[in-house]
Amino acid sequence: MTAPRLGWWWVATPVLLAGLVFFALDQVRTAGYVLAAGLGLAALLRLVLPTSRAGGLAVRSRAADVLTMAGLGLVLAVVTRVLDLTPQG
């Protein structure tokens, strides 16, 4: 038995990891935008690559994958934009 090819998922992964690093460094707004950009990049890759090359980005149908990743990226960008990060107290 062989493992499935993961394909082009590695192109979006460094962007998503960078977002997590920004979050760990307490740069919440930057982290949110970088994570949203990573999801947008993953959606774009899934949209333009054939399913045989998309690898780990292909989970459901192309439309469902693209809409899910793009939608989550958009929602994350909006939530990041409206965050109130002023200290309370």
Image (cartoon, rainbow, N blue to C red):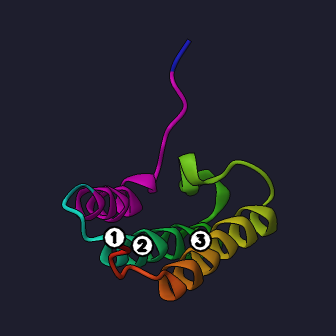
Residue most toward the front? Answer: 89
Q: Earlier in the sequence, mark 3 or mark 2?
A: 2
Q: For mark 3, what is the residue?
A: 43
Residue 42 position, x and y percent, is: 52, 67
Q: Mark 3 packing: few (<14 Cα in 10 Å), some, or many (20+)? A: many
Give the residue displayed 58% in from the left and 85% down from the top: 78
Looking at the picture, tell me which residue is in the foreground, 61 or 36: 36
Amino acid under label 3?
A: Ala
Q: Say if mark 3 contacts mark 2, CB within 8 Å.
A: no
Q: Say if mark 1 contacts mark 2, CB within 8 Å.
A: yes
- As measured in the structure, the alpha-carbon distance from the residue carrying label 1 to the one carrying label 2 is 6 Å
In the image, residue 11 above or below residue 70: above
State the quadrant of the C terminus: bottom left
Q: Mark 2 packing: few (<14 Cα in 10 Å), some, or many (20+)? A: many
Q: Is residue 27 found left or right of 70 in the rendered image?
A: left
Amino acid under label 1?
A: Val
Label 3: state its secondary structure. helix
- Helix, strand or loop: magenta stretch: helix
Give the residue displayed 59% in from the left and 71% down from the top: 43
Q: For mark 2, what is the residue?
A: 32
Looking at the picture, tell me which residue is in the foreground, 6 or 34: 34
